Image (spheres, rainbow, N blue to C red):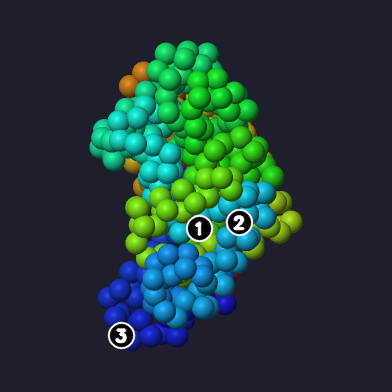
Amino acid sequence: MAVIPTLEADVLRRQDPEMAELLLGELARQSTTLQLIAAENFSSSAVLAALGSPLANKYAEGYPGARHHGGCEIVDVAERLAVERAKALFGAEHANVQCHSGSSAMLAAYAALLRPGDTVLALGLPHGGHLTHGSPANFSGRWFDFVGYGVEAESGLMDHVQVRALARTHRPKAIVCGSIAYPRHIDYAFFREVADEVGAYLIADAAHPIGLVAGGAAPSPVPYADIVCATTHKVLRGPRGGMILCGSELAERVDRAVFPFTQGGAQMHTIAAKAVAFGEAATDAFAAYVHRVVANARALATGLAAEGLHITTDGTDTHLIIADPAPLGVDGRSARGLLAAAGMVLDCCALPHGDARGLRLGTAALTTQGMGEGEMAYVAALFASVLRQETEARTAREKVRDLTEGFPPYPGR
Ligand SMILES: *Cc1c(COP(=O)(O)O)cnc(C)c1O
């Protein structure tokens, strides 16, 4: 199966060698370094084939059976398939698969439920909230009045006492639960209870854990939240994009909030690729995959802790690990640089205590490549050795290259 069909046919190489070189260079980069960015993964060749298909040519404003363009009879079937698969996978009454990204899903969720100036309670950005949870640089912070809750300084766990107190004081119109950096399961029943107490809508931003939910390795927000927003490209391993799940009573409001309120024409190639990914995620193989993702994250967290890094919440329930490298004598930003030079690609992130930056990493991509707990122990040891500057960047880079050789993300290429 072609990973990049146009390249496979050598069309792009002949027509535009400059860009073909870049695409191949990026494939080589992804294949020979370790993708530890918690939000990244390798989607399958089947997903990439749908993305590179002629569905990309089709204009399809509106929804199946009610489009503003002709010639939609086939893409209508593709979108219905994506919607039905998403509903079945997550046990949701309604799914909107048109959201261009996780952020657009959040924009549409707010548009469906709120008016400008409404108060929203969400995890504060320094504690792991996303830009769409009230950053002043984002529409959310500009158009709504966000109040931030936090995690406890000692445990790193969400401060439920504070959530309840802030909800009672500020009477928000909506409460958002979800994070870019929280490594533990979220107690959706708790958030539902608080939302009911103060008469707020509950929006779950499950962009990170939705893939774990699909495979049964994390609790589902669907029975608790009024609206669930998600991405399809993180642990879920589909194309870059977003999705909204909700009950039937909000279906129409959500659909109108996506199109025509916040988006134009749907990207039918991406929607087809989402359907392919939902099909993959419904298999036993995917359930086994997400459980391996979590086992690998636990093994990596244990390995890093044994090397002396401080792991927030003392571990993880998910694919995600937040580590403070300070005990090894290096700050987050320098650590990211040292690791990048060694071929270990990850992000910095805020730490719940103080101003120091930490490291955010995840195991979704390495697990897709077939790595297991033995490789996690190896990576943890190499990681720490690079941070202590006991292993030179060039030596570490070679070790990483050797390791990745045994685990090609797209075998046969
Ligand atoms: C990744 C993420 C998003 C945004 O997704 P994009 O597709 O990058 O817009 C929103 N919220 C949370 C919690 C995320 O982790």
Q: Quadrant of residue 22?
A: bottom left
Closer to the eye: label 3 or 2? 2
Q: How dense is the environment of label 3, judged by Cα within 10 Å: few (below 14), some, or many (20 and up)?
A: few
In percent of width and height, residue 136 lies at 26, 33
At x 39% / y 23%, what residue is drawn? 148
Label placed on residue 24: none
In this view, the residue farthest toward the right is: 284
Decide if residue 337 is in sight here.
Answer: yes
Residue ID for mark 1: 97
Say above or below: 351 vs 206. Answer: above
Compute the Cα span from label 2 to label 1: 8 Å
Residue ID for mark 3: 15
Q: In the depicted view, which residue is nearer to us: 248 or 60?
A: 248
- Mark found first going from the N terminus, 3 or 1: 3
Q: In the depicted view, which residue is nearer to us: 15 or 216?
A: 216
Compute the Cα span from label 3 to label 1: 34 Å
At x 35% / y 53%, what residue is drawn? 261
Q: In the depicted view, which residue is nearer to us: 246 or 323?
A: 246
Compute the Cα span from label 3 to label 2: 38 Å
Q: Is mark 2 within 8 Å of ligand 1?
A: no
Say above or below: 18 vs 36. Answer: below
- Mark found first going from the N terminus, 2 or 1: 2
Label placed on residue 86: 2
Local secondary structure at mark 1:
loop
Q: Which kind of residue does numbered mark 1 sit on?
A: Val
In percent of width and height, residue 166 lies at 44, 16
